[in-house]
Amino acid sequence: MSDIQTSTVSEEGFASTSQVGEFELTIDALDEAGPNPNAVLVADYASCFLPAFRVGGQQRGHDDLGKVQIDADADLDEDDDLEAIRFDIYVEADLDDETLATILERAKDICHVHSALREELRADATVHGDAF
């Protein structure tokens, strides 16, 4: 038996609806009925990386990072394939650059999406402390 099961259906056109457990997600290659697959992948990556960053902070003795925000940018090649992803990570806690870098490296080890992506597509991340 598998660990994750989804069902994705498209009645017509380029939009599809995925059932993921109790949740429904509409994805549209044309960005009309929902975000396109590349945008969803970038958002999914950031959504996985953010809690991994928090866990990395906890494991390094920083239980309260406060508000954390990831602004993600991605580049597409001439075939509309993802070519590069960048994260700007903003952290409310006032931590020095070395501590933030240590937490960032730990988050890379924890994030499952980061591990699943080919190495050249993994996010180039910059962390900004005392950001809010």
Image (spheres, rainbow, N blue to C red):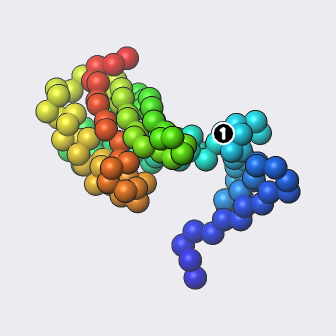
Indicate whether 23 appears above or below 86: below
Q: Residue furthest right?
A: 11
Name the image quarter holding residue 86. top left
In this rendering, would 63 be left or right of 48? left
From the viewer's perspective, is 24 left or right of 47? right
Q: Position of residue 18 (x, y in %)?
A: 71, 56
User: Which quarter of the rendered picture does the C terminus lie within?
Assistant: top left
| Residue type at tag 1 | Pro
| Residue 119 locus on image (x, y percent) | 32, 54
Residue placed under numbered mark 1 in the picture: 35
Q: Is residue 51 something one can see in this rendering?
A: no
**Number of on-image labels:** 1
Residue lying at 85% horizontally and 53% vertically, measured from the top left? 12
- Mark 1, residues whose alpha carbon is within 10 Å: few (<14), some, or many (≥20)? some
Position in image of residue 39 (x %, y %): 57, 40
Residue nearest the viewer, comparing 78 with 27:
78
Left or right? Give the position of 47 relative to 33: left
Q: Residue at x 14, y 33 (%)?
A: 98
